[in-house]
Image (tube, rainbow, N blue to C red):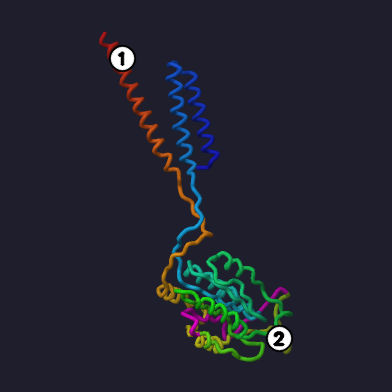
Amino acid sequence: MPVPALITIFIIAFLVMLFVWIRSRESRIKSTFALVRGIAIASLAFIIALRPMREERGADVQLSNLDVLFVLDTTLSMWANDGPSGTRFKTATNDILDIMDGLSGANFGLISFQNKATVLAPFTQDEDTVRGLIKTIQTPDRYYMKGSRMDTPYYDLENMLISSDRKENRQTIIFFLSDGEVTGGGELPYNYETLGNLVDGGAVLGYGTEKGGTMKDEFGDIYNTQTFEKAVSHIDEDNLREIADGLGVEYLHRERSTLLTPLITEIKAGSSTITERRYDYITYHDTYYKYVPYLAGLLVLELAIRIRETVKVRKKDGKKTGK
């Protein structure tokens, strides 16, 4: 019940009791005692209805032993419009959010890459921060882009995998989300097989189609500078499979018929829970129950007084009737 409503009810009850006390024909001591009891009962009921709580900082929480790392391709080709949920990028970010929901309680990390890689979030329990960072990613500027390479996130990926591997009783899960297209020269100069022993599970998720899709940025459609036609980006599944083989995880082409649920279920089944003391957690404990015995005692006292007065009145009426 809203506090203003509680205050209003209490004030009305107090005014009624005051009115009854003023109009009472009983002795002033007896009527004042009744008024004090009534105010005490109403006050305790008011406090209990407010539901006071005690704040406690720090709590033991059950957490997953997973470090889940997302490596997200944010090159211009990821804004091609041949994804099952609009652009490839939109489909990929939706997948990240679904995975986070399915593996809630894990530590999450996020690396994005285009011309260079950026660690947007080291492993953290703060899921809201990771979600917020994903929303801040904008369509890249066509004049800034210099082509894309699949080896761009290698060093940052390696560092984060090593940091996770140093922790005790942790499993490192990686999701590499990309269309696999290389437009910046070279193929895969860095061998992802060197990182395979640092990965416990996950998948490489591929976006786009062989037919391809056109792209837009804030200035409009992207055109091929040689043919002057709209540029078309195609998925390169060979590159994505090579990355998946190197990391020792499966490759999934993200189409409408592809479900992530079995993969998430498998990862959860292989994980365990650990208890951690988290001092950034704030919990609240009810304290209203402390006032309940006093209210119950006053109500029992009020009932006993009412019964006693009723018995007296009946005896008095009986004597009058007998006369």
Q: Is residue 273 visible?
A: yes
> Which SS class for mark 2?
loop
Sequence-wise first label, 2 or 1: 2
Tell me: residue 273, above or below residue 308: below
**Is-magenta flag for residue 211?**
yes
**Is-magenta flag for residue 265?**
no
Tell me: residue 204, above or below residue 301: below
> Which SS class for mark 1?
helix
- Which residue lies most toward the top here? 323
Range of magenta residues: 196-218
Q: Which mark is drawn over residue 224?
A: 2
Residue at x 55%, y 39% (from the top left corner)? 4
Residue 194 x %, y %: 53, 87
Residue type at numbered disc 1: Lys
Closer to us: 280 or 129: 280
How many C-alpha atoms fall within 10 Å of the one at disc 2: few (<14), some, or many (≥20)?
A: few
